[in-house]
Image: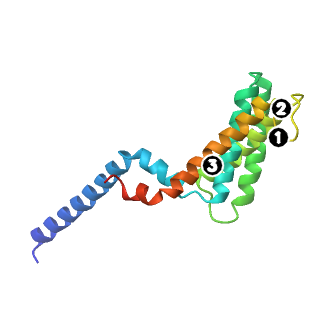
Amino acid sequence: MGVAVRAHLTIHSSRSWFAARLASSIDRRMTPSRDILEYFFQLRPGKVALWCYLIWYLATVALYFDPSPSIWLNALGISAIVGTALLLSVRGGPSADRWQVFRLFLMPFAVSSFSALIKNQGFFLVFAPGLRGISAQLGACALFLVAVVGLKAMGGKIRAGPA
């Protein structure tokens, strides 16, 4: 095979590889809703529980928000200290992915701010004192669980795409 032919094949295969990568990238960018549905379809029970914790936290913050900077600055400080310790504790094994690192810092922030927000509010453990609060917390989690179960029930349709 001549040098010109090899050069042409190399350029052609590079273009094909590049074109395939570009098409794949464009295809992924044009279907973010399908990616999100696929993510929630594949959720394992442990991640579903983590999402429920986040939803519970956000419902509580929405109902009992306090704009006092000291609450949020203290939560950031605790998050930095405890998150770093947690990160160091998991670095012995395979390196943590970016979402795991995010969760390692988010959880101490959420626990600290949650604790400060519910102080003297009449909570029993983590349950809001009134029907309004407990309904919002449980209702938001229940709605999420129903959505995940519904996605799992129609999972084949999500993967197959539009008809």
Residues marked 1 and 2 touching at CB (< 8 Å): yes
Residue designated by label 1: 126
For the residues labelled 3 and 1, the Cα–Cα distance comes to: 19 Å
Q: Earlier in the sequence, mark 1 or mark 2?
A: 2
Rendered location of residue 54, percent (x, y) = 68, 42
For the residues labelled 1 and 2, the Cα–Cα distance comes to: 8 Å
Number of the label disc, if any, that sits on residue 145: 3
Query: Which three-letter amino acid code belongs to the residue tagged 2?
Result: Ile
Residue designated by label 2: 118
Front-lying residue, 94 or 72: 72
Residue at 58% across / 56% down in the picture? 43
- Disc 2 is placed on an element classified as helix
For the residues labelled 3 and 2, the Cα–Cα distance comes to: 25 Å
Q: Within 10 Å of the Cα at label 2, are there few (<14), some (14-19), or many (20+) other Cα atoms? A: many
- Check the image and report above or below for 125 versus 92: above
**Which of the 4 quarters of the picture holds residue 135?**
top right
- Disc 1 is placed on an element classified as loop
